[in-house]
Amino acid sequence: MRVPDNLSNLPTSPVTIQDYLQLNIVLRNWAVMVKSVLRNSASRFQKGKAGTRTRPAADGPLRKKFPNIKTWKEHKIKDRLDYKVYNKHGIAEGVGFRIQRHGVFVHKGVGRGYQVRGGMVVRVDGKGVGRKKMDRAIISAPIRRQPVDWFNQAVDMHTGELADRVAEVHENLVVNSLRMRIN
């Protein structure tokens, strides 16, 4: 089969297998470094979880209302912080950070009796188990929780460094950091 003339003049891709392997190493090293920064950032949370807890409690109200609910374990945020490099066909495509569920609550400043409404943290009536989120009435009580930007700040601080390292490996590749944030 003959290749048409207009396709034979196309330039070949300047990216080599070595570039992709080097990119994988850069991404993995960056993720390890950011993981340690996130651990340091999360280590300032001394209150709260002490060791491992199984949720929901065996005799708790959630277990009584929903007896078939699955249990899960909760740990301190810094103890269960991990990353995963996502690959497609052996080429690193992205990095994801796995954090404990309550790490997101701390980041947003919400939790039992607190919700975000209209971009602000408000106190809500916490009576009742398993009630729908937006059914709870806003109450006038002092707000003792504030959002703590422990995750996005640490990731954003090092995203430029990742972009520079990726540009060193290959100048045509782009770093998209929009999905590495807690929104």
Image: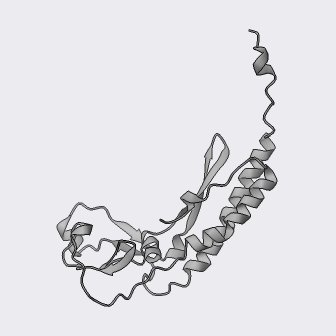
Q: Residue at x 79, y 15 (%)?
A: 5
Q: Residue furthest bottom?
A: 142
Residue 77 in percent (x, y) is at 50, 75
Q: Classify 126 as above or below 132.
A: below
* Residue 20 location, quadrant: top right
Colour theme: one colour
- Residue at 48% of width from left, 77% of height from top? 76
- Residue sitting farthest toward the top: 1
Q: Nearer the viewer, residue 107 or 118?
A: 118
Of residue 177 and residue 90, the one placed in the foreground of this image is 177
Where is residue 125? Give x, y as percent.
22, 80
Q: Is residue 95 left or right of residue 33?
A: left
Question: In the depicted view, which residue is nearer to us: 8 or 50?
Answer: 8
Residue 19 in the image: above or below residue 166: above
Residue 57: image quadrant is bottom left
Residue found at x 77% / y 59%: 165
Q: Quadrant of the N terminus?
A: top right
Would you say 32 lies left or right of 9 here?
left
Residue 174 in picture, x, y percent from top left: 69, 51
- Does residue 14 appear left or right of residue 173 in this picture? right
How many numbered discs sit on the rendered protein? 0
Res. 136 image quadrant: bottom left
Image location of residue 68, percent across then percent down: 23, 60
